[in-house]
Image (cartoon, rainbow, N blue to C red):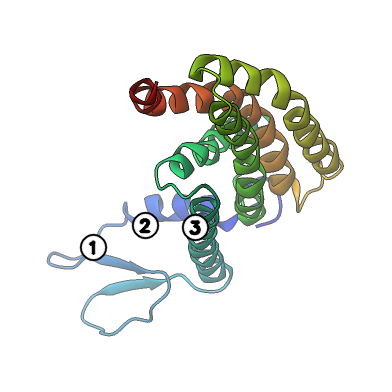
Amino acid sequence: MAGELESPVYAILGMTEKLNQIPLKPGYTLNELYIQQPTEESNYTVKWDGEWQITLEVFRDLGAAFLVVIIIIYMLIVGWFQNFKTPIVMMIAIPLSLVGIVLGHWILDAFFTATSFIGMIALAGVMVRNSVLLIDFIEIRLQDGVPLKQAIIEAGAVRTTPILLTTGAVVIGASIILFDPIFQGLAISLVAGAIVSTLLTLIVVPLIYYITERKKWEIKK
């Protein structure tokens, strides 16, 4: 699908709308198959094959890989912090990056492709690292006897610079391929996702951590 559409996804969706407008004999329906083969000849069937089937299989495999990545990241953080709730707060940075990815594709009027999905997976680990930097510093200060609010403020003051440096490195590195016709989706996911997720992570993650841990530290106090 070279040209205006760039991806078979949008072409197939357009064809599906046109196929649904075809008049059929009474009692017949039009079935569309994407991965499996037709099993009977008593009805009308369209089998989408070739590049479209490859696209579906790629997105299916990338979705499974993304799920595995999230589970492994969660297990690693649980093993380090010995806590099941705190890692969930840290991983809020992942859906926050999706906000930036969607906005980036919309602003640049670009299509979401398989390379965009790869960028989203790659970005997950980087963005969680920002949350780990914040919350790890907060818990260190809490162990020193510092009040929760003060610990959160100090974490923002001390860890913002390394977080912004990490994000800047990702953005500068990915911006080189921002206008590449093949890897543009990857670059948009990395650049837009990193910028928006970092800005939101510095605000949202400490706020949610404060809400979830306030009662715990008030009781200890």
Residue 126, placed above or below residue 140: below
Amino acid type for the residue under numbered disc 1: Leu
Percent x, y for residue 212?
38, 28
Residue 20, placed above or below residue 146: below
Point out the tag, 3 or 2, that comes first from the N-terminus: 2
Amino acid type for the residue under numbered disc 3: Met
Q: Quadrant of the N terminus?
A: bottom right
Q: Name the residue under label 2.
A: 19
Point out the tag, 3 or 1, that comes first from the N-terminus: 1
Amino acid type for the residue under numbered disc 2: Leu
Tell me the number on the disc at residue 120.
Answer: none
Q: Name the residue under label 1.
A: 24
Residue 178 at least partly seen:
no
Residue 36, placed above or below residue 193: below
Q: Is mark 1 on a helix, strand or loop?
A: loop
Question: Which residue is at 50% across, 73% downward?
Answer: 49
In the picture, measured across the screen, residue 73 lies left or right of residue 126, that is left
- Within 10 angstroms of label 2, few (less than 14), some, or many (20 or more) residues? some
Question: Which residue is at 45% across, 52% downward?
Answer: 13
Comparing 122 with 154, the one in front is 154
Q: What element carries label 2?
A: helix
Q: Mark 3 points at which residue?
A: 75
Comparing 161 with 122, the one in front is 161
Percent x, y for residue 152?
56, 20
